[in-house]
Image (tube, helix red, strand yellow):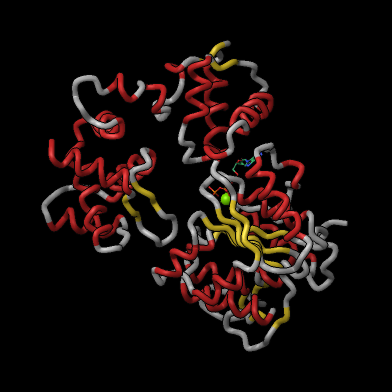
């Protein structure tokens, strides 16, 4: 039985409209993955899977946290498919991707004439549509405070009200939420509601980063190689580079690299074939630094920054100052600061610099509204460079 046939309340027209909207949201309404599809033999991933499988059987909200590309969406789908809700819709929504008012009408629907441009006859919200199924709230940390209150109401009361409406509609929807960041830090900094956090976090699943998954790196490498129908081998040094790479983009990054390497059409992939971001392959710490006395990270920063070192140091300085005040700092503030000091840096340039610094693991960029934060390695590199340049 298809997931739509189970909901008798909707007309064919409503279902058609709905499918269109889901396509527009670029997200599916069916969960494809099962736990069997989640590849991994490391202890950490097996533990995460077994916890999530147990949680799937309950009706409570689940909060999946993990870095980008660790498989949060995969897990959310697998949870739905192992639950008694599997014959009903699975609706995935990215909370950080949509403007607030659009998101509100998507989630809760609206009544006829609720606002200018509203569709005649009103619109069904995704919560109503997902009745008896699961709603996956991806990047939940990006949800605005106003919507956080409304979501809390759905979870607590199982009720929604359409925009511009006054009728309470009862819904039975299970929430699976995902976040790239630890939400408790956002609660502490006041950007995420504590009461909502506790409601979502009833059942927490933490997904391990790929760099902590040991042999899973080569296991996944082999799986993706097969998927792309290629048979190249890694040289011993290249394999070592794979095993020690930071993998900030986790499994998605690994998959992308396998695809990229497949295009090279070589039998053996050696270090020089690997993308630049494979730092450990560029040169080993001691060798690279002969004579200069700089740390490995500073050396990498010098290479990456090239003739833009001043801009990199300026951004690091902003982050360092924010850190001293126990704050995070966003692109806007950095841009304003640069402007006030007569330094010309566009938002895009600042974004690039922040991404590179994040790639070097000197800072951590938060998605959503969290801003960026320097870490201890970043501070020591900044101090080292500031004294020299
Ligand atoms: N254990 C796994 N086995 C096979 N493929 C996986 C596994 N984990 C993740 N992937 C693949 O890695 C990619 C990223 O997974 P997914 O989209 O679930 O990550 P995510 O944590 O939601 O990332 P983001 O935070 O960036 O949205 C997908 O292509 C997915 O199919
Ligand atoms: Mg995701």
- Quarter that holds the C terminus: top left
When asked about the image quadrant of residue 352, the answer is top left
Q: Is residue 237 above or below residue 79?
A: above
Q: x and y percent of residue 69 in the render?
A: 55, 44
Q: Is residue 313 above or below residue 219?
A: below
Q: Is residue 298 left or right of residue 253?
A: left
Q: Residue furthest top?
A: 267
Q: Is residue 235 visible?
A: yes
Q: Is residue 8 above or below residue 210?
A: below
Q: Nearer the viewer, residue 300 or 257?
A: 300
Q: x and y percent of residue 169 in the render?
A: 71, 82
Q: Nearer the viewer, residue 376 or 197?
A: 376
Q: x and y percent of residue 108 in the render?
A: 62, 74
Count all numbered tags in the image, as a single digit: 0
Q: Is residue 254 above or below residue 73?
A: above
Q: Residue furthest right?
A: 1
- The residue lying at 74 percent from left, 57 percent from top is 80
When asked about the image quadrant of residue 355, the answer is top left
- Quarter that holds the N terminus: bottom right
Q: Is residue 215 left or right of residue 187?
A: right
- The residue lying at 61 percent from left, 77 percent from top is 110
Q: Nearer the viewer, residue 140 or 302?
A: 302
Q: Is residue 100 left or right of residue 129?
A: left
- The residue lying at 84 percent from left, 70 percent from top is 8
Q: Is residue 129 visible?
A: no
Q: x and y percent of residue 47 in the render?
A: 68, 48
Q: Nearer the viewer, residue 235 or 150?
A: 235
Give ligand 1's quarter of the image: top right
- The residue lying at 34 percent from left, 39 percent from top is 356
């Amino acid at each position: 039985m298809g997931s739509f046939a189970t909901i008798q309340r909707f007309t064919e027209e409503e279902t058609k409209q709905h499918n269109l909207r889901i396509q527009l949201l670029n997200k599916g309404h069916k969960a494809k993955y099962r736990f069997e599809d989640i590849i991994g033999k490391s202890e950490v991933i097996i533990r995460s899977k077994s916890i999530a499988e147990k949680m799937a059987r309950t009706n409570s909200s689940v909060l999946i946290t993990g870095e980008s590309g660790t498989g949060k969406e995969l897990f959310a789908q697998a949870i739905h498919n192992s639950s008694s809700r599997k014959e009903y819709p699975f609706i995935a929504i990215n909370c950080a991707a949509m403007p607030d008012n659009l998101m509100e009408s998507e989630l809760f629907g609206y009544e006829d004439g609720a606002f200018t441009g509203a569709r005649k006859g009103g619109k069904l919200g995704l919560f109503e549509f997902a009745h008896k199924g699961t709603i996956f709230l991806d990047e939940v940390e990006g949800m605005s405070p106003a919507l956080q209150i409304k979501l809390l109401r759905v979870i607590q009361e199982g009720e929604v009200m359409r925009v511009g409406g006054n009728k309470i509609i009862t819904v039975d929807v299970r929430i699976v939420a995902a976040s790239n960041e630890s939400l408790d830090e956002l609660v502490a900094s006041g950007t995420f509601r504590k009461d909502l956090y506790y409601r979502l976090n009833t059942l927490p699943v933490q997904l391990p980063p790929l760099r902590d998954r040991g042999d899973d790196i080569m296991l996944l490498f082999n799986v993706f190689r097969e998927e792309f129908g290629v048979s190249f081998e890694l040289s011993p040094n290249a394999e070592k580079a794979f095993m020690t790479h930071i993998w900030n983009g986790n499994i998605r990054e690994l998959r992308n690299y396998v695809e990229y390497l497949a295009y090279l059409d070589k039998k053996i992939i050696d270090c020089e074939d690997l993308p630049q971001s494979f730092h450990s392959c560029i040169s080993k710490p001691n060798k690279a630094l002969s004579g200069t006395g700089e740390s490995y990270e500073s050396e990498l920063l010098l290479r990456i920054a090239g003739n833009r070192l001043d801009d990199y140091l300026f951004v690091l300085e902003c982050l360092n100052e924010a850190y001293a005040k126990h704050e995070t700092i966003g692109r806007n503030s950095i841009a304003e600061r640069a402007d006030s000091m007569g330094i010309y840096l566009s938002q895009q340039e600042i974004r690039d610099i922040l991404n590179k610094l994040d790639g070097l693991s000197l800072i951590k960029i938060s998605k959503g509204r969290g801003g960026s934060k320097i870490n201890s390695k970043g501070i020591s590199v900044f101090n080292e460079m500031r004294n020299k340049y």
